[in-house]
Image: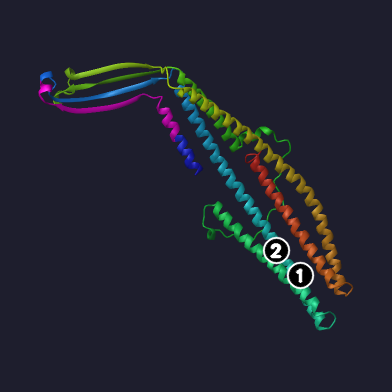
Amino acid sequence: QAAARLAQARALLRSTDSNRALQVGASAGAGRQGGEAARAMGTAGTALSAGVNLSYEIDLMGRLSKASEAAALDAQAREALLHATHLLVQSDVAQTYFALRALDAERALMRDTVAAYQDTLKLTEKRHAAGDIAELDVARVRTEVAATQSQAIALDRRRAELEHALALLAGDLPSSVSLAEGQWSEALPSIPAGVPSSVLARRPDVAAAQASLKAAQARLGVAQTAWFPTLALTASAGGASPELSDLFKSSAGLWGLNALLNLPLFDGGRREAGVQNAAAQLDLASAGYREQVLVAFKDVEDQLSSLQYLAEQARVQSQAVASAARALQLSDSRYRNGLVSQLELLDARRSELSLRRQALQVRAAQYQSTVGLIKALGGGWS
């Protein structure tokens, strides 16, 4: 759609530029008159004509050039919006892919947790068979196994949806994309500090808003030139004859040259209204440009703040995961030796699983924010 709009804008530019060129046309005509009145006036008979017509408008006040400039800026804005569409699709693909890989890591964690619960279930069933514990303990572990398996299935469903989203971004049918489970890279792209704010000027949406603003300025100039006269030159050459065989003889030649200066004196306020409309369009484009620039700065600040806080959160979360893993290890050992109840072991495992999932989600958010920052910078920072 964005590419079609760009093609449309370029066609309108060519159409506007054509008004500044020499216009050439050919004409031919045939007519016949009869009747008493025509014979009395000597106009009875056949009249044939053929000729070439030329016209050219002299751009006295720059109206045509300003119109071409505005159309060219419209085309630039559409081209920038096409780049913005490319950037949007690219960033969506990257974020969707990293979200899918984050789910792969979470699904692997859930599988490991299910296996651990199943080991605990086997141990609990053995102890129940030996009469060491009640059936209630077995039911609790079975509940945890089923609940964790249910969460794993929910992650499978979510992964299928992300695969379908990737297919949509690629313009394919949902069933055409199937990615094997894989790992994501440990290293995040490093955006250097001190990137100048001038890089935001190359953001496609900012460039499009800037081009639209300049186009509105040019159109205000076009509207203002309506108060000034226009000068058009026309010329024609050809021949006229009652006989087709004599039409192109020198004796049948005709030519004409005209200059037309046009200055409307009263139009009921139409020109003034046109200027006011163009001025309002300029105010609208100016406000849109300012808004787009502010949005660009906000996007960058949002992602920078997000990455800063996520880095701190990841550090703290890793400490929590390490502590939870150690607590689970101790609880499992004490449970196997009959020193603690089953509830303590299950609580420790649930806590460790929850913290590990949260750590994966923080890591996934870091990837999302990194892609978001690259997108906010217009696709890069070099």
Is there any visible trace of residue 183 in the rendered image?
Answer: no
Q: Residues within 10 Å of mark 2 (few under 14, many from 20)?
A: some
Q: Which residue is mark 2?
A: 108
- Residue 116's mark? 1
Please say whether residue 85 is one of the residues in the magenta stretch: no
Q: Position of residue 38 (x, y in %)?
A: 13, 22
Residue 381 sits above or below residue 27 on the image: below
State the residue in front, 297 or 230.
230
Residue 76 against residue 135 in the figure, above or below: above
In the image, the segment drawn in magenta is 11-39
Q: Quadrant of the C terminus?
A: top right
Which element carries disc 2, helix, strand or loop? helix
- Type of the residue with mark 1: Ala
212 and 336: which one is in front? 212
Q: Position of residue 101 (x, y in %)?
A: 66, 57
Q: Is residue 215 left or right of residue 162?
A: left
Q: Is residue 294 left or right of residue 73?
A: right
Binning the other alpha carbons within 10 Å of mark 1 as few (below 14), some (14 to 19) or many (20 upward) gives some
Q: Position of residue 279 (x, y in %)?
A: 54, 26
Q: Secondary structure at mark 1?
A: helix
Please give the name of the residue rendered at 85% of the width and 63% of the height, measured from the top-left corner: 326
| Nearer-the-camera pick, 8 or 282 | 282
Q: Amino acid at mark 2?
A: Ala
Q: CA distance from mark 1 to mark 2?
A: 12 Å
Residue 38 within the segment the image draws in magenta:
yes
x, y percent for residue 239: 20, 21
